Image (cartoon, rainbow, N blue to C red):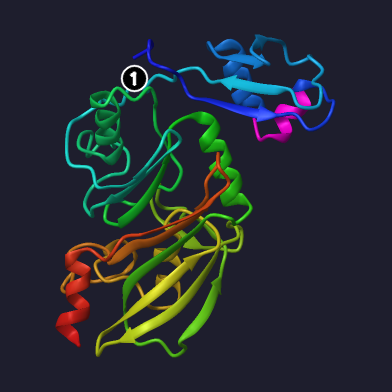
């Protein structure tokens, strides 16, 4: 795999500036730059290797050749089904099934999405590792965004911070909602008695979820949710906090008599491509178990 062509990007200088400053302006983080300098990468200006102290001229072509990253020692590549929605040299978008970990855990060391993505890269001789930009809980299904190298992951993280990446979910929650559209703005932090559970607490991190009720059934409601922040268990905690836990989410008060897993699905993912700058939009329909709740109860 090391003999394969590594990922690289080329930029054009539009002003006379020190290379280090230009790289920062193009979104190359200090950590990424260090990995290029000391991890086997190269920086070329008009085809010649230079240091970051080099002064660029207008029109100079700057090529950053990123080092090929190795998979972490604890992640084993596995063959298995992978529902690929989109893939190019920088990004991989997949539709994750329910009851699959995004990354391996002590309870589920094999069969995670990360294991299968690593297997996909190995089988297709793709010189990349994986950096998961949008992780989903084991029970949650839907779209997951994966960067193929550290720099792309950094660029996606900046999009999330600037709210240019948008994730829209659909869920089924217990009870009947009084309002059709509303926003939950409540801080979320770790519950003191648990290493897993989160709760709304005054010393937590700012968290905001937009809610739209799509349809109300006698015992539960079909809702659409827009995440404006990305806190752990955010949707689950916010809905439970207002008295409407997700169906199947027994960790936060939901019952499993209707659905045997938390009824949450990441349906739409919108982002700006970190290389081309083009807007991207992906959609994954509800899985059969959640979709059946709509058709059976109408």
**Above or below, 243 relative to 131:** below
- Residue depicted at 53% across the width and 20% down the height: 66
Q: In which quarter of the image is the C terminus?
A: bottom left
Q: Residues within 10 Å of mark 1 (few under 14, many from 20)?
A: few
Q: Position of residue 159 (x, y in %)?
A: 58, 49
Residue lying farthest to the right in this orientation: 16
Q: What stretch is highlighted in magenta?
A: 20-28
Which of 117/242 is in front? 117
Q: Which residue lies under the disc numbered 1? A: 73
Task: Tell me where residue 33 sits by quadrant.
Answer: top right
Which of 5/248 is in front? 5
Task: Tell me where residue 38 sits by quadrant.
Answer: top right
Q: Position of residue 247 (x, y in %)?
A: 26, 71
Q: Position of residue 30 (x, y in %)?
A: 67, 26
Dominant secondary structure (helix, strand or loop) of the stretch shown in magenta: helix
- Residue depicted at 66% across the width and 35% down the height: 27
Q: Position of residue 99 (x, y in %)?
A: 21, 52
Q: Is residue 25 magenta?
A: yes
**Above or below, 100 relative to 116:** below
Which of 174/31 is in front? 31
Q: In which quarter of the image is the N terminus?
A: top left
């Amino acid at each position: 795999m090391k003999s394969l062509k590594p990922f690289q990007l080329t930029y054009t200088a539009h002003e006379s500036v020190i290379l280090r400053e230009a790289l920062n302006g193009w979104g190359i983080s200090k950590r990424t730059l260090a990995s290029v300098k000391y991890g086997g990468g190269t920086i070329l200006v008009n085809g010649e290797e230079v240091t970051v102290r080099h002064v660029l001229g207008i029109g100079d072509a700057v090529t950053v050749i990123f080092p090929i990253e190795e998979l972490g020692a604890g992640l084993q590549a596995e063959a298995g089904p992978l529902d690929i929605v989109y893939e190019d040299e920088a990004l991989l978008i997949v539709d994750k099934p329910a009851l699959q970990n995004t990354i391996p855990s002590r309870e589920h060391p094999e069969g995670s999405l990360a294991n299968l993505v690593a297997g996909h890269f190995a089988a297709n001789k793709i010189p990349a590792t994986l950096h998961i930009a949008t992780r989903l809980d084991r029970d949650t299904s839907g779209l997951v965004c994966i960067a193929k190298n550290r720099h792309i992951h950094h660029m996606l993280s900046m999009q999330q911070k600037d709210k240019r990446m948008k994730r829209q979910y659909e869920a089924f929650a217990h009870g009947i909602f009084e309002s059709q559209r509303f926003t939950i703005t409540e801080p979320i932090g770790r519950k003191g008695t648990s290493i897993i559970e989160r709760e709304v607490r005054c010393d937590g991190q700012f968290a905001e979820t937009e809610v739209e009720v799509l349809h109300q059934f006698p015992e539960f409601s079909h809702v659409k949710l827009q995440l404006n922040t990305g806190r752990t268990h955010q949707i689950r905690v916010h809905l439970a906090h207002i008295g409407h836990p997700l169906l199947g989410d027994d960790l936060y008060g939901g019952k499993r008599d209707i659905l045997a897993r938390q009824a949450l699905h990441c349906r739409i993912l919108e982002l700006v491509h970190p290389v081309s700058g083009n807007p991207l939009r992906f959609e994954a329909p509800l899985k059969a178990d959640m979709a059946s709740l709509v058709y059976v109860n109408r």
